[in-house]
Amino acid sequence: MHSQRNIGRLSVYRRLLYGLLEARTEYVHSHTLASLAEVTAAQVRRDLMAVGCCGTPRRGYAVSFLIESIGELLDTPEPQGAALVGIGNLGSALLAYFSGRRPKLAIMAAFDIDPAKVNRVMHGCRCYPVEKLENTVRKKDLRVGIVTVPASEAQGIAEALVRGGVRGLLNFAPTRLHVARDVFVEDMDMTMSLEKAAFFARREDRKRKARRVS
Amino acid sequence: MHSQRNIGRLSVYRRLLYGLLEARTEYVHSHTLASLAEVTAAQVRRDLMAVGCCGTPRRGYAVSFLIESIGELLDTPEPQGAALVGIGNLGSALLAYFSGRRPKLAIMAAFDIDPAKVNRVMHGCRCYPVEKLENTVRKKDLRVGIVTVPASEAQGIAEALVRGGVRGLLNFAPTRLHVARDVFVEDMDMTMSLEKAAFFARREDRKRKARRVS
DNA sequence: GCCTGTGAAGCTATTCACAGCT
DNA sequence: AGCTGTGAATAGCTTCACAGGC
């Protein structure tokens, strides 16, 4: 219950539900949501138990009510802020993507060492020099940190974020972060994921060829 | 055996091993590698069974031999190529990051709709107009595709890549891709990951406060 | 009839624990 | 003594299957 996987899928369901809402769909069945999310219907129903089920037989789940219920679990009552460190191509992409999208979870401050990038406002987000990281994070009470700096800097930045009060990290640097056990780390390891995709692409390819022979 | 998790961790171990090699470390114990990778020693040993174990009691594993063994599983004998679609901030970041890093797995072609970006060479990679996607992928025999286009374009791009022969996708678009079952999809869902980090940050924070009271 | 909610079964992944080695 | 390799135990996750409801 409330496992990492579970929470991740609920986030996916919510995004899909917003899409359905836009299309004026009022009700959705578990198997419909399942095929949109590429999981089984049983999985959807099981996941939705985490938000306190609310489906009606025959019609399924009320889309807007379901969005609200998932929001009650995933969102804080008050908006929660995140800090982004490293305003390179990747950091800029994230700033652009998250700006104004989630009212309850926005990037409230960005940091970089490059003086040229600092003291500007990018995609509605103020940029600070990295020296002010710890204090700014503390002052703004940010609890989530996004690390988009080179691998060599990542560990030091993570430690500064944690000193500032951050309890959840989203790490894009190609390195493992060593932090206290009570800090949650989500790794976005592109090298690993690409190698995985390459490995399983090859395996599928072999399977396909074997099938053609038989 | 050779599960997704297993392959992912092997990729991580390999990167750590390269770091050890640079530091002139010849041998490594499972528990050393484990603490670098933030997993248990038993997990490391179990994972290494997938490459055919090769440790010696007392001294542990020979770093360079282990790198080679993992490479035999993860890499193809001939270099394997990937296609990247969508040369925005995110795509550029990936091109820059992967350029010249892995000799056995490189981005061999990039695609975009923007005529200004096309027919240039970025980070050693040639850029093509997206109309030439399917044919170029087929001609160059690329089996891995990286999707960094907006959500609205992602499904169409994925289908074109698969028609061109791609069997593994690395998807950065905030949407689920619906492809044949024999195509591997690895999702890099930033919204999901950020919401997950926010959720567990909050939970850790609550736990910490509870501890302080007791 | 066809849906949801859920106990129970089945499956996968991780950890334990110890034999075997040096 | 302290390591690896691995069967066995455990924990965690997903799917099955069906009772209950509209």
Image: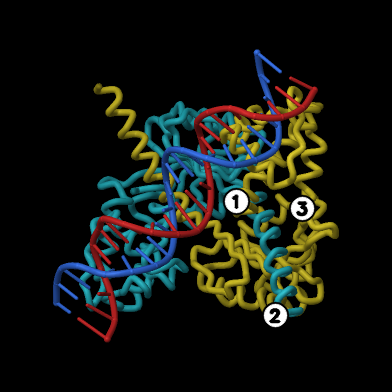
Chain colours: A yellow, B cyan, C blue, D red
Q: Is residue A22 visible?
A: yes
**In the displayed structure, does residue A167 sit left or right of residue A174?**
right
**Residue that badge 1 annotates:** B90
Residue B101 location in percent, x, y? 40, 58
Number of the label disc, if any, that sits on residue A138 = none
Tally of numbered discs: 3
| Vertical arrangement, residue A69 with respect to residue A175, above or below | above
Report helix, strand or loop for mark 2.
Answer: helix
Discs 3 and 2 share one subunit: yes
Q: Label 3 is found on which chain of the structure?
A: A
Q: Are marks 2 and 1 on the same chain?
A: no
- SS of the residue at dot 3? loop
Q: Residues within 10 Å of mark 1 (few under 14, many from 20)?
A: many
Type of the residue with mark 2:
Glu
* Left or right position of B77 against A198: left
Q: Are marks 3 and 2 in contact (CB under 8 Å)?
A: no
Label 1 vs label 3, nearer the camera:
3
Residue B101 visible here: no
Q: Which residue is mark 3?
A: A99
- Please tell me in which quadrant of the rendered image residue A210 appears: top left
Q: Which residue is mark 2?
A: A131
Tell me the CA gap for discs 3 and 2.
24 Å
Identity of the residue drawn at 65% across and 59% down:
B197
Image location of residue B174, percent across then percent down: 64, 42
* Image coordinates for residue B62, horizontal then vertical, percent: 24, 70
Share a chain, discs 1 and 3? no
Q: Residues within 10 Å of mark 2 (few under 14, many from 20)?
A: few
Question: In front: B60, or A102?
Answer: B60
Nearer to us in this view, B95 or A45: A45
Q: Is residue B46 left or right of residue B111?
A: left
Residues under labels 1 and 3: Cα distance?
A: 15 Å
Q: Nearer the viewer, residue D6 or A117?
A: D6
